[in-house]
Image: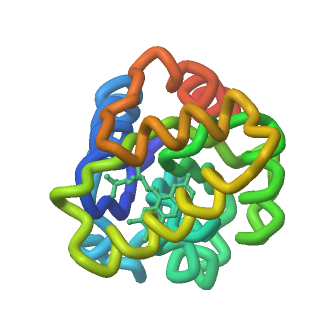
Amino acid sequence: MNRIVVYTSKTGFTEKYAKWIAEELKCEAVPLKKANLSELANYGQVIYGGWIMGGMVSGYDKIKKLNLKNLIVFCSGMSVPTDTVRDNIAKQNDIPADRLFCFEGGFAPDRVGFMGKMIVKMISGSISKKEDKTPEDIHMLEAVKGADNTDRAAIPPLVEMAETI
Ligand SMILES: Cc1cc2nc3c(=O)[nH]c(=O)nc-3n(C[C@H](O)[C@H](O)[C@H](O)COP(=O)(O)O)c2cc1C
């Protein structure tokens, strides 16, 4: 089957996953801004990945409009990708939960720009005020200091799905 990985990455974590997935599936990984959207329907399968911003999968709005038949979506964020996180992101972005894979990215304070830093400061500020912090909250508060938590070992379930659907 001819397939393609398309991605949006601001600081490189999602790009890392896109390239690992493309390597496993022996196909191309192309940034969304360089992809020819009108040609994506010619692929038997499209795998789209975007970074999470305030719960939204960046760039997915453009992909969604194409109504692609065989689409798999992944995202990378700084939160721990629990099933609850996955289900919330699926709901918020209107992505079928069984076609969505959430991976742990990281946080690169020096590459997100002033606004990015401010927004993340607000998110982490509200988490630090919580009285009963979950282990995920504590992990996120550590990640905002700067971390690369990408892990190639997380991609096999996506690769297996891509090869079977
Ligand atoms: C403005 C902003 C908002 C973010 N919101 C979230 C969020 O809601 N949930 C989350 O898990 N990560 C959030 N992040 C963290 C990024 O999703 C994370 O750093 C991601 O791995 C970046 O991917 P990239 O390197 O491909 O750009 C946010 C980062 C920024 C800069």
Residue nearest the viewer, comparing 124 with 156: 124
Q: Which residue lies at the image location 47% right of the left edge and 54% below the top edge?
A: 49
Horizontal relation, residue 61 to residue 22: left or right: right
Quarter of the displayed picture in which ligand 1 can be seen: bottom left
Q: Position of residue 72 (x, y in %)?
A: 62, 50
Front-most of 52 and 64?
A: 52
Residue 89 screen position, x and y as percent: 72, 59
Q: Quadrant of residue 79?
A: top right
Q: Residue at x 37, y 58 (%)?
A: 7
Viewer-nearest residue: 40 or 19? 19
Q: Is residue 26 positioned above or below 100 on the image?
A: above
Residue 83, percent across and down?
80, 36
Residue 41 visible in the picture: no
Question: Position of 28 compared to 119: left or right?
Answer: left
| Left or right side of 131 for 103 | left
| Quadrant of the image containing the C terminus | top right
Residue 44 drawn above or below residue 120: above
User: Which residue is found at the position 37% from the left and 24% from the top?
Assistant: 24
Residue 13 visible? The answer is yes
- x, y percentage for residue 55? 64, 65
Asked where in the image residue 96 lies, by quadrant, the reply is: bottom right
Determine the residue positioned at 33% across, 68% down. 117
The quadrant where residue 9 appears: bottom left
